[in-house]
Amino acid sequence: MQTVRIFIITAAILAGAVIGVAQTLEPTPVPMQAATPALVPDAKQQAEMAENIKQLRELKAQNDEILKQQQAALEALDDLQKEADQLRIYSKRG
Protein backbone atom coordinates (compact mmCIF):
# COMPACT_ATOMS: atom_id res chain seq x y z
CA MET A 1 0.00 0.00 0.00
CA GLN A 2 2.78 2.36 0.88
CA THR A 3 4.64 1.51 -2.35
CA VAL A 4 1.54 2.43 -4.35
CA ARG A 5 1.42 5.85 -2.66
CA ILE A 6 5.10 6.40 -3.35
CA PHE A 7 4.59 5.36 -6.97
CA ILE A 8 1.64 7.78 -7.42
CA ILE A 9 3.49 10.67 -5.77
CA THR A 10 6.60 10.00 -7.86
CA ALA A 11 4.53 9.82 -11.06
CA ALA A 12 2.80 13.12 -10.21
CA ILE A 13 6.14 14.84 -9.51
CA LEU A 14 7.61 13.46 -12.73
CA ALA A 15 4.56 14.57 -14.76
CA GLY A 16 4.76 18.06 -13.22
CA ALA A 17 8.46 18.27 -14.07
CA VAL A 18 7.85 17.21 -17.66
CA ILE A 19 5.04 19.75 -18.07
CA GLY A 20 7.18 22.49 -16.51
CA VAL A 21 10.08 21.78 -18.85
CA ALA A 22 7.76 21.61 -21.85
CA GLN A 23 6.34 25.04 -21.04
CA THR A 24 9.74 26.66 -20.74
CA LEU A 25 10.97 25.43 -24.12
CA GLU A 26 10.82 28.05 -26.81
CA PRO A 27 8.50 27.27 -29.70
CA THR A 28 10.05 26.85 -33.11
CA PRO A 29 9.75 30.01 -35.19
CA VAL A 30 7.18 29.97 -37.97
CA PRO A 31 8.60 30.99 -41.34
CA MET A 32 7.01 34.20 -42.58
CA GLN A 33 6.09 34.87 -46.16
CA ALA A 34 7.26 38.05 -47.80
CA ALA A 35 4.70 40.83 -47.78
CA THR A 36 3.04 41.39 -51.11
CA PRO A 37 3.23 44.93 -52.41
CA ALA A 38 0.07 47.00 -52.10
CA LEU A 39 -2.07 46.82 -55.19
CA VAL A 40 -2.78 50.14 -56.83
CA PRO A 41 -6.47 50.44 -57.66
CA ASP A 42 -7.24 51.02 -61.31
CA ALA A 43 -9.38 53.86 -62.65
CA LYS A 44 -12.63 51.87 -62.43
CA GLN A 45 -12.05 51.01 -58.77
CA GLN A 46 -11.14 54.61 -57.99
CA ALA A 47 -14.34 55.81 -59.64
CA GLU A 48 -16.39 53.28 -57.65
CA MET A 49 -14.66 54.39 -54.45
CA ALA A 50 -15.39 58.04 -55.22
CA GLU A 51 -19.06 57.21 -55.87
CA ASN A 52 -19.28 55.20 -52.64
CA ILE A 53 -17.71 58.04 -50.67
CA LYS A 54 -20.19 60.47 -52.23
CA GLN A 55 -23.12 58.22 -51.26
CA LEU A 56 -21.78 57.85 -47.72
CA ARG A 57 -21.49 61.61 -47.35
CA GLU A 58 -25.08 62.02 -48.54
CA LEU A 59 -26.24 59.40 -46.04
CA LYS A 60 -24.32 61.14 -43.29
CA ALA A 61 -25.99 64.45 -44.13
CA GLN A 62 -29.41 62.76 -44.06
CA ASN A 63 -28.61 61.12 -40.72
CA ASP A 64 -27.47 64.43 -39.27
CA GLU A 65 -30.76 66.02 -40.35
CA ILE A 66 -32.76 63.19 -38.77
CA LEU A 67 -30.76 63.54 -35.56
CA LYS A 68 -31.54 67.28 -35.46
CA GLN A 69 -35.25 66.54 -35.91
CA GLN A 70 -35.17 63.91 -33.18
CA GLN A 71 -33.36 66.28 -30.82
CA ALA A 72 -35.98 68.95 -31.45
CA ALA A 73 -38.76 66.42 -30.79
CA LEU A 74 -37.09 65.34 -27.54
CA GLU A 75 -36.81 68.94 -26.39
CA ALA A 76 -40.49 69.54 -27.20
CA LEU A 77 -41.44 66.40 -25.24
CA ASP A 78 -39.34 67.58 -22.30
CA ASP A 79 -41.15 70.92 -22.36
CA LEU A 80 -44.51 69.14 -22.43
CA GLN A 81 -43.45 66.96 -19.50
CA LYS A 82 -42.44 70.03 -17.50
CA GLU A 83 -45.75 71.73 -18.26
CA ALA A 84 -47.66 68.58 -17.25
CA ASP A 85 -45.72 68.44 -13.98
CA GLN A 86 -46.60 72.10 -13.32
CA LEU A 87 -50.29 71.39 -13.98
CA ARG A 88 -50.19 68.48 -11.54
CA ILE A 89 -48.63 70.68 -8.88
CA TYR A 90 -51.19 73.46 -9.38
CA SER A 91 -54.10 70.99 -9.43
CA LYS A 92 -53.03 69.55 -6.05
CA ARG A 93 -52.96 73.02 -4.48
CA GLY A 94 -56.24 74.14 -5.69
Image (cartoon, rainbow, N blue to C red):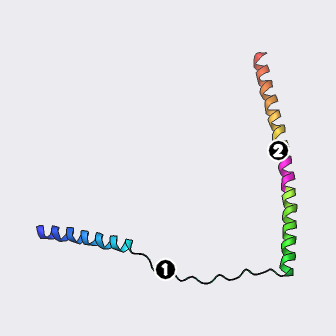
Nearer to the camera, 70 or 22: 22
Q: Quadrant of residue 85?
A: top right
Q: Quadrant of the N terminus?
A: bottom left
The image quadrant of residue 26 is bottom left
Q: Quadrant of residue 93?
A: top right
Please tell me whether residue 64 is drawn above or below residue 87 in the rendered image: below
Asked whether residue 27 is drawn in magenta, I would say no
Q: Is residue 94 above or below residue 47?
A: above
Tag 1 residue: 29
Which residues, given as a range, are shown in magenta?
63-69
- The residue carrying mark 2 is 71
Q: Is residue 16 left or right of residue 27?
A: left
- Determine the residue positioned at 73% across, 80% down: 38
> Secondary structure under badge 1?
loop
Q: Element under label 2?
A: helix
Q: Is residue 71 visible?
A: yes
Residue placed at 84% from the left, 38% from the top? 76
Mark 2 Cα-neighbour bin, 10 Å: few <14, some 14–19, many ≥20? few
Question: Given the image, on which type of amino acid does mark 2 rest?
Answer: Gln
For residue 5, side relative to residue 40 (left or right): left
Task: State if disc 1 and disc 2 touch (CB < 8 Å).
Answer: no
